[in-house]
Image (tube, rainbow, N blue to C red):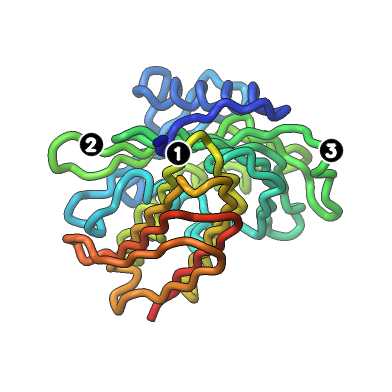
Amino acid sequence: MLSVTEIIPSDNIHAEETRANLKRLKELTKGLEGWEETDDQSGVKLYHQPDASIPLVRGDTLLLTKDLPPGCTPLAVATVATLPGCRRIWDEKFDESKVLEYYSRYESLFWVKLKAPWPISPRDFAGTSIRDVGENTVYCSMVSVKDETIPDTSGAVRGQLLVSGWKLSQLAGEEGIGITYVNQVDLAGYIPGAFLKKLLLQIPLCAGKVRDYIMTHGFVPTTTVIQNDRLVEFKGEEFHHEEKKYTLQMSVQGTDASTHTVCSQRMYPDGIQVELKGEAEITQSVDTHGNALVHLSHIKGLIQLCITKK
């Protein structure tokens, strides 16, 4: 059986560019060589690379063990950092987004639009995202690509993500989880200097926004998919913060696939309600931290799992 936490080979047209960007993200976050500290705000250390022709910024923070919702892992933090339903809460610049195609569980083609104050035009981006999930470290990288399925958007200026991504690491001992966010973006078009300076300060502070979300709300339902011979087609994953509603859709060939979902007790203090559409065996339990667990096995065909608060 294969846990879908590895980089699955893909022949999609953007695969090479996507993986090159992931490699660059890993190089940028393996240490502090080349980075110059610029500030320390709200528990986030801010850095930039002084030799970069286009501003390259970084924010580092720590989700301390004493503040961690019990059972929280780097993968759970990555889910909060990347799901649009969470980002809508922790990122005031976020407007809307959609996934155009899922290449695998953790690789997709996306479009996202960000707000901007008048008279600056909103920016939108077309790109790919990929997650590399290890036992103690998770990388999430995003890069702009040109794709005919994502034409320019009326009323927005198309920017370019040169590199953007997260490194979430379980630290040794009892420290907690390290959160690093790196971003280099060409916003294209005219941007007033004062606004750009403020923006370059706000971007790396996203690391602290994700930390604060988890400290306050807990982590969103985090699903690991177990499959045999890669016969799972991932259809989508959504989360609505206000309703605490999590939805997972997938299609399975054969009956060897299963899923395991952990639901934070901090987010669901009164427990969860589960609805399953499609054919699968469902088992519910509670772990030693009080987190609700939902396990699906013997999945057949197309299924939809929906989890809400009681």
> Would residue 59 be found to the left or right of residue 284 on screen?
right
Label 1 Cα neighbours within 10 Å, binned few <14 / some 14-19 / many ≥20: some
Instruction: Mark 1 and mark 2 in contact? Answer it, CB < 8 Å.
Output: no
Q: Which residue is mark 2?
A: 171
In three-dimensional space, the C-alpha distance between marks 3 and 2, rounded to whole angstroms, equals 42 Å
User: Is disc 3 in contact with disc 2, using a CB cutoff of under 8 Å?
Assistant: no
Q: Nearer the viewer, mark 3 or mark 1?
A: 1
Q: Is residue 215 left or right of residue 56?
A: left
**Measured Cα–Cα span from mark 1 to mark 2:** 23 Å
Along the line of sight, which residue is nearer the eye, 241 or 299?
A: 299
Task: Identify the mark nearer the N-term, 1 or 2.
Answer: 1
Q: Amino acid at mark 3?
A: Glu
Q: Quadrant of the N terminus?
A: top left
Question: Which residue corresponds to mark 3?
Answer: 148
Q: Closer to the camera, 193 or 116?
A: 116
Left or right of residue 174: residue 207: right
Residue pointed to by mark 1: 4
